[in-house]
Amino acid sequence: MHGQLQTPQLTQTQTEQPSNHRAESVPKSRISFLIISAHTPPPTNTTKMSFAGKWETETQEGYEEFCKLLGIPDEVMEKGRDYKLITDVTQNGNDFTWTLVYPTNATVTNKFTIGKESDMETIGGKKFKATVQMNGGKLDVTFPNYHHTTEIVGGKLVETSKSGAVVLKRTSKKI
């Protein structure tokens, strides 16, 4: 059986103990075997991650191309190029309040529950309905003109917005 993993076959006497048997009398070798052979459930695609906190933009990649794709006027795009957007996230289990705070103190707030359709609003004020999903620790939602994914990578909030081949990637640090 070279190259095959062999699973030890346990007999009833190896797995069951009499009711008067005390744990401290179990040989250490048996305890070790039981610990390393414990079943671990397979991972799910709904791994929960904490997004809660205040985050400040550090870097943006693809900003200009993405803004042009969305039809944002050049003067607005220029003003927003280097500002530090604050993302304030409150999370209670699957319930989120996600607020974007702009340097002008203008805000956009979206409240949603993972897996349930919610009323949402874009940064431009357009209202729409969407269902935010949690997939492998990432939040996924489709906006009217693009798909948006948010995840925590190395302690940073990483948001990726994609429409066709155009991608905006914004990385924020916790403040």
Image (spheres, rainbow, N blue to C red):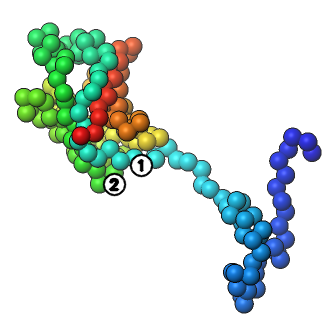
Looking at the image, tell me whether mark 1 or mark 2 is earlier in sequence order: 1
Task: Report if residue 147 is visible in the image.
Answer: no
Task: Report if residue 22 is visible in the image.
Answer: yes
Q: Which amino acid does label 1 sit on?
A: Lys
Q: Do residues under tags 1 and 2 come within 8 Å of each other at their CB atoms?
A: yes
- Label drawn at residue 48: 1
Dot 1: element: loop
| Residue 13 x %, y % | 83, 77
The CA span between labels 1 and 2 is 8 Å
| Residue 25 x %, y % | 74, 82
Tell me which corner region of the image, top left, top right, bottom left or bottom right, holds residue 53: top left
Measuring 69% from the left and 81% from the top, which residue is drawn there?
24
Q: Which amino acid does label 2 sit on?
A: Gly
User: Hey, which residue is sitting farthest bottom in the picture?
Assistant: 20
| Residue 135 x %, y % | 44, 40
Question: Label 1: how many residues lie within 10 Å, few (<14), some (14-19) or many (20+)?
Answer: some
Question: Label 2: how many residues lie within 10 Å, few (<14), some (14-19) or many (20+)?
Answer: few
| Residue 105 x %, y % | 7, 33
Disc count in the image? Answer: 2
Q: Note whether 28 is above or below 49 in the view shown.
A: below
Measuring 39% from the left and 47% from the top, which residue is drawn there?
49
- Label drawn at residue 173: none
> Which one is in front, 17 or 26?
26
Tell me which corner region of the image, top left, top right, bottom left or bottom right, holds residue 112: top left
Q: Could you tell whether 61 is left or right of 47 in the image?
A: left
Q: Quadrant of the N terminus?
A: top right
Q: Note whether 3 is above or below 23 in the view shown.
A: above
Q: Could you tell whether 42 is left or right of 141 in the image?
A: right
Measuring 35% from the left and 14% from the top, which residue is drawn there?
166
Q: Quadrant of the C terminus?
A: top left
- Label drawn at residue 93: 2
